[in-house]
Amino acid sequence: MKKLKDKRLFENISSFLLVYLPRIRNKSDNTIISYRLALKLFIQFFEQAKNLDVFDLTTAMITRDSIVEFLDWLGSERNCSASTRNNRLSCLRTFYKYMVTHSDPSLSSMMNDIAEIRKTQIVKDQPPVILTEQEVALVLAAPDTSTRIGIRDRFYLTMMYDSGGRSDEILSLKLQNITITGKISKIHIVGKGGKSRMTPISEKATALMRHYLKIFHPAQDRSQYLFYIDRDNMKRKMSADNAARIMEKYERKVKQEHPELPHLHPHLWRHTRAQNLYSAGMPLPLVSEWLGHSNMETSLIYAHADVEMKRKAIEKATSGEHSLVEKELPRFMNDKDIIKQLYGII
């Protein structure tokens, strides 16, 4: 069995995520998820851009230059915004400082080099990247709905778009949060700060929901999570990593024929849904309420739609045509994934 070249590095990652952040720094679950994702993506960068086996990764490879390359990779390969890249940089800096103070003080000189990396300047008032109507249809049509997993994946992606919810809001839904009345439904979402809202779900998404519930929730246990994974004969809440793998799977599939497709991530669906609602004539205060924004100014980024875009969208919205979901995302375990799971990265 292949051994880790730098086992101490992965031990540091594990203790950082599982002990230091939650117990010493008392960080929230969402904050820890952000750190975990940053480290996971950094390792993924070495695997994909450097063609490096995860077993061969060492602390010495974490340098100012490799982090700068990583940030460039996030922008070019994953279309990450400046704020997202800055967040990933902050996470890596915190982790490296942890290694210096808790594991190896000799790394302090490199920590100073990493501290010199300048954050990307954020250009304010820029409209968010969104999917076109065709791109939404391509992604939602990508899952093979002749399979059980394909049915789940299509419904998950549809819910991400249709609801405009944040990733954890959708993954935290339980059957008790869903109300189906005839051909339509609504979901009770608990958002940031415990603020709750009711979100209507379209007729076509509701039809997919009925089919999904029949297959994945035949017992109709209302205490169960809507999206779950089976592990040790127990249904557990689907993790953000599982959800990310679903999006990565269909991003790769669609990009084979449509390489211009933006990188799929939860907020891309949220931005797309919000922009489409606003462009179709929904007032900005209502868009803000739909998204669960505590301040309407947060929703102003969607006010960039040009007149022609709004004109066409309103024509479609008032034509009686409902094209919301005309067309329509497991665990992939290998030795590398097991290593990452053991050390708390996934």
Image (cartoon, grey):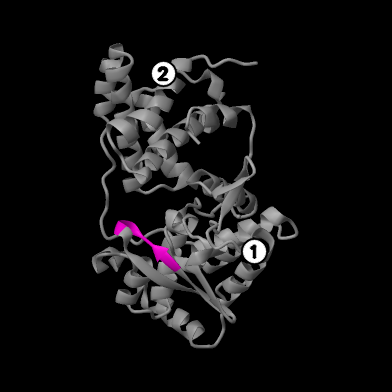
Q: Quadrant of residue 2?
A: top right
Can I make out residue 142 in this image? no
How busy is the neighbourhood of tag 2: few (under 14 within 10 Å), some, or many (20 plus)? some
Amino acid at the residue labelled 2: Thr
In the image, which is nearer the foreground, mark 1 or mark 2? 1
Task: Please give the label number shown on residue 212.
Answer: 1
**Which residue is rendered at x = 29% and y = 42% of the image?**
120
**Which residue is rendered at x = 59% and y = 82% of the image?**
182
Disc 1/disc 2 C-alpha distance (Å): 45 Å
Residue carrying label 2 = 59
Can I make out residue 283 in this image? yes
Magenta part of the chain:
188-193
Split into 4 quadrants, where in the image is the N terminus?
A: top right
Q: Does the magenta stretch include residue 192?
A: yes
From the viewer's perspective, is 109 left or right of 235? left
Q: Is residue 67 above or below residue 57?
A: below
Q: What element carries label 2?
A: helix
Amino acid at the residue labelled 1: Tyr
x, y percent for residue 123: 27, 53
From the viewer's perspective, is 162 left or right of 326? left
For the image, the number of numbered tags is 2
Q: In this view, does 4 lie above or below 210?
A: above
The residue positioned farthest toward the right in the image shown? 146
